Image: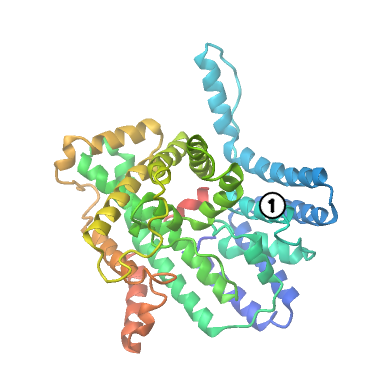
Amino acid sequence: MLFNSIDFALFLPTVFLLYWFVFNKSLKLQNVLLVASSYLFYGWWDWRFLSLILFSSVVDYFIGRKLQDTEKASKRKYLLWVSIIVNLGFLGFFKYYNFFLDNFLTAFSFFGNDIKANSLNIILPVGISFYTFQTLSYTIDVYRRKLKPTKDFIAFSAFVSFFPQLVAGPIERATHLLPQFYSKRKFDSTKAVNGLRQILWGLFKKVVIADNCAQFANEIFNNSNDYSGSSLLLGAVFFSFQIYGDFSGYSDIAIGTSRLFGFDLMKNFNFPYFSRDIAEFWRRWHISLSTWFRDYLYIPLGGSRGGTSMKIRNTFIIFIVSGFWHGANWTFIIWGALNAIYFLPLLLTSNNRSNLDIVAQGGFFPNIKETFQMVSTFFLTVIAWVFFRADNVSHAFSYISEIFSFSIFSIPEFDSMGNPMVTLLLIAVFLVIEWLGRRDEFAISDFVTKWPRILRWLFYYAILFSIVSLGGKEQAFIYFQF
């Protein structure tokens, strides 16, 4: 079920009314409703994969209980590894089986040995990378004694399957989200209104920005041999805003929807395209994933402690694994490695935490240095996104090589796609609003509320009108494939 669909427009108010007006007398019943609604939400896509969520919930619930009852270190470690193997085993089979098989066969054929093996026609369960990491965080935190295991299976099932963030995050930590299912929720109109405002902004990002950019990005990437370097660069810029509007728009809708039910989810995007270096970008982009890898992989490996070789090793591991998490394709691995290369000079010179405050903190406009830093960081990010979007490695390299050819100085051509100026104007308006709200939780969470009521409502209606009249062709959320 897509957030930007008629199905969800009917589903959400129905669940909302039942939650607050029918099941509001009992916390247990509210949690049961959330579990049932979440399973319906996920099963709307393919009911067969509900068994994976249920099985993962059962395994990690009972392992958590066993970890509480066990003091012997070796047995606790054994239980932890059972959880890791089960969860990553499912993820590896559905997402990476054919990738490893194809590369295994290619490696042997390179040495003159032909091995016959058939690939499997495997359907990738939507959101498996997200809820797998969410359940793993529970088991790991219980193992580390940072969290007491729950005895409430319904609450735990609701935590695993919570429909607003089930298929594309944010990847919540059990220490943050799970306790919220234990507490009685009271309807908070202020929180609900703020949630609706965030849903509205998320829909604008997705429908108006991402879906319109997708029209041009898809055409250019799918026919890159037909376009000049300037057109290809603009196509990469369109994809950069497509993926940002698409993914951060989903996160905004998820967080806003959660507020309607009295829950707080973690912030997943913090205006990443205003970053002044790559380290700052990764503190602001897909925060729930980058912090997950930091806490459960990077720090256990030694983090930035130790010598230079360890720092380099850990940096490449964290970024390459992050790239591989996104998909079973060498393009994602190179995308991760390229970001590691971007990041290393900052780490090795101890400048990776130089930009911790908001850009232009003391004023409205950035200074010349900040402007140059933002533009150069965005350019590096755009080039990296080419690998993320390309069909394969050779496609990515040919695409980038044409960007850096003399044809970069030609005038971009879009004859077969229509005029991109409307979309570029929408991006410009979008960036202005994001800039005005860069200090806040999301772009229109605060500064708009200070306007006179009539201007505020005119602004909301303008956004709603643009969603209805200027939205691009409906596209599935990009991160559903991860």
Residue type highlighted by circle 1? Ile
- In this orientation, which residue lies closer to the viewer: 358 or 26? 358
**Residue drawn at point x = 44 percent, y = 76 percent:** 197
Q: How is the image coloured?
A: rainbow
Tell whether 170 sits left or right of 230: right
Look at the picture and state if 265 lies above or below 131: below
- Callout 1: helix, strand or loop? helix
Q: In the rendered image, which residue does mark 1 sit on? A: 140
- In this orientation, which residue lies closer to the viewer: 459 or 123? 459
Tell me residue 299's x, y (percent).
58, 47
- The image quarter in which residue 407 lies: top left
Viewer can see residue 411: yes
Look at the picture and state if 210 lies above or below 460: above
**Residue drawn at point x = 31 percent, y = 51 percent:** 378
Crowd around label 1: few <14 · some 14–19 · many ≥20 (10 Å): some
- In this orientation, which residue lies closer to the viewer: 275 or 475? 275
- The image quarter in which residue 42 lies: bottom right
Residue at far bottom of view:
453
- The image quarter in which residue 162 lies: bottom right
Tell me residue 15's x, y (percent).
61, 73
Tell me residue 332's x, y (percent).
46, 40
